[in-house]
Each structure stands twice: as structure tokens, then as C-alpha cells.
Image (cartoon, rainbow, N blue to C red):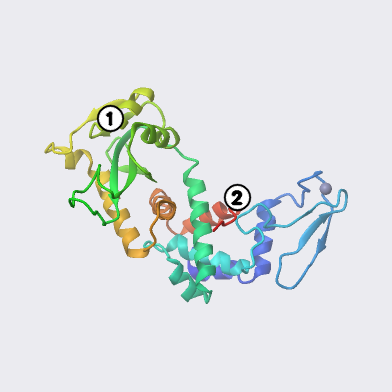
Amino acid sequence: MTILEWQDQFPTDEACREYLFKQRWPEGFLCPQCQGQKYWTIQRSERTAPLYECTQCHHQTSVTAGTLFHRTKVALRVWFMAIFMVAVDKGGQSALTLSRELGLKYVTAWLLHHKIQQAMADRNGLYKLGGLLELDDAYFGGISHGSGKRGRGTDQDPVIVGVSLDAQGHPQHAFFEAVSDVTNETIAEVLDRRVESLGVWRTDGWAGYAAAAKTHHADHEITLSDDPEAPVVFHWVNILISNAKTFIDGTYHGRGRARRQLHLEEFAYRFNRRHFGTRLADRLLVACFTASPHPYRT
Ligand SMILES: [Zn+2]
């Protein structure tokens, strides 16, 4: 979908609300409390979305209740356009760009972007990688106070990265997980959530992967990092790490593990859906209205 088609589909807040109404209740209104089908519309003000009150049990709901847009003060049309922009831009849309392009205060744009990233993270969390995997840990953040040594044992921030490959060796899906360390416990916790059991795991033999491969009954193929074959074996995971670093350095300057993780989720979300083309905006919109509200806590 092009930006013009998107604007034609969602020209007003009203059009966005109608869209959400149809997505939420494709067969017509259904009270979430008593399954009643009749409702009154309560228009509270010009700016806010109307409430729908069930005529049977008087439960009130709205099209945005329970979605990422819950209690939002930002116009739905602006939300929808932000989602489109975040979906289609390969470099990622930083809060600064959103604020400039949509005429929003920086804090508002930042919050929108943050919430859209959380919807992406929710989606990413639904899938596990399986089959043939390249697994490694990467080190983000350039500040190393010590010897200048890079990698494990330095004070750089570790990120566990996995990519699944098809039979021809082409990359399929990827995950990134910013972690505090690469101990066996941490690696086990991450891989339990991100990776299916069985399959073939290619790693550099780090103890955490060896232990997890055992519990997951995976075939563990070890190639040490100084092996001349290593660049071939870890081709895709290396490319992904390098691209993710470019993405994060180019677009964001925030630090801290939680922020870094959300940026990585955005990168992974787009990578895993790279063949969707312009349909990605529709998919991201669905991800946003099916996502939980994610109240922002400072
Ligand atoms: Zn009801």
C-alpha cells in the first residue's frame, strides 16, 4: 500500500474508528460482558472516541479499549500514519522524524514510537525459531573502559542473536535479545523462549549454548571462532549483527538495555517480514490493535 492509498483509506479519525469497529466486531457489536448485541453510542466530546453502552447490562466499551490506543489523547489518524511510517521506512523512523513529519511534540512522538515498538515486540514474542540455526552473542555499545578488548568478558552490552536457515542456507527468521550476561542460566532462559527444541544449532561452542543444546535435544555443531571456516558457518548471523548495529547507531542514541531491546525488536520485526513489501503497514496496524495497552511507566 502506498502512502496515498493509506491516506485514502484513513482520511479521518472517523474512518479509523470505523475500521477498528469492523475489525473488533466483524459481525456487528457484541458486548464483551454479556454478549448483548444492542448498544447506545455516547459521544463524550468532539476529540475522544465514542463509548458504546450495552443496552442490556450497561457495560461501556470503545473500539480502542484493550488495544495499544487505549485512552490515547492522540488522534487515531495520526496514530495510523505513524504506524505506516514506522512500517515502511527501512531505516526505522526515529521519534524525531515522526515528530517533524506529523507535527507532534517530541515526547508524544517518542511515546507513539515506543508503543509501536512494544506491539512489534509482542508479535515477535509469539514465534520461536526452529530447524537449522546460527546462534551467537554480539557486543553492542562502543565504550569499553578496560583493555579495549571486545566481546565476552568486557563491559560492552551482550545481545544473543539467532537466525534460522532454510535447506538452501537462506536466512528465514531472526531474534535479538539484549541480556546482562551470557551465563548458562541467561542463555537457557532466552533460548527456552526464542527457540524450538530439536533442530541443528551452529555455535562457537560457548558453554551456555552447549548446555542449552543438550536440554533442547539439538544437534550441536561447533565451529570455534578462530576456525578458518567460521566466517562461512556464521555468515548470516554476522550479517544480521552488523546490520542491527548500523540500524541502532544510525537511528537511535538512547542507551540502556530495555531501550536497546525495543530497537532490536523493531529491527527483527522488519527483518522477519521483509518479503511483505507494502503489506507490512497493514500487518503492523493489526499488531497494534491486538496488542495489550502497555501503559508507559517512567
Ligand atoms: Zn452487555
Camera-nearest label, 2 or 1: 1
Considering every residue shown, the one lying at the far left of the view is 228
Measured as percent of width and height from the top left, residue 134 is found at 29, 38
Residue at the location (40% across, 51% down)? 257
Measured as percent of width and height from the top left, residue 217 is found at 36, 22
Name the residue carrying label 1. 207
Between 237 and 35, the one nearer to me in the picture: 237
Between 20 and 124, the one nearer to me in the picture: 124
Name the residue carrying label 2. 292
Of the two numbered discs 2 and 1 on the same chain, state the one appearing first in sequence: 1
Q: Are marks 2 and 1 in contact (CB under 8 Å)?
A: no
Q: Could you tell me which secondary element the residue under label 1 belongs to?
A: helix
Amino acid type, mark 2: Ser
Measured as percent of width and height from the top left, residue 295 is found at 60, 55
Considering every residue shown, the one lying at the far right of the view is 56
Seen in the picture, residue 207 relative to 293 is either above or below; the reply is above
The disc at residue 126 is none
- Location of residue 207 by image quarter: top left
Amino acid type, mark 1: Ala
Q: Is residue 205 left or right of residue 37?
A: left
Residue at the location (66% across, 52% down)? 66
Q: Could you tell me which secondary element the residue under label 2 belongs to?
A: loop
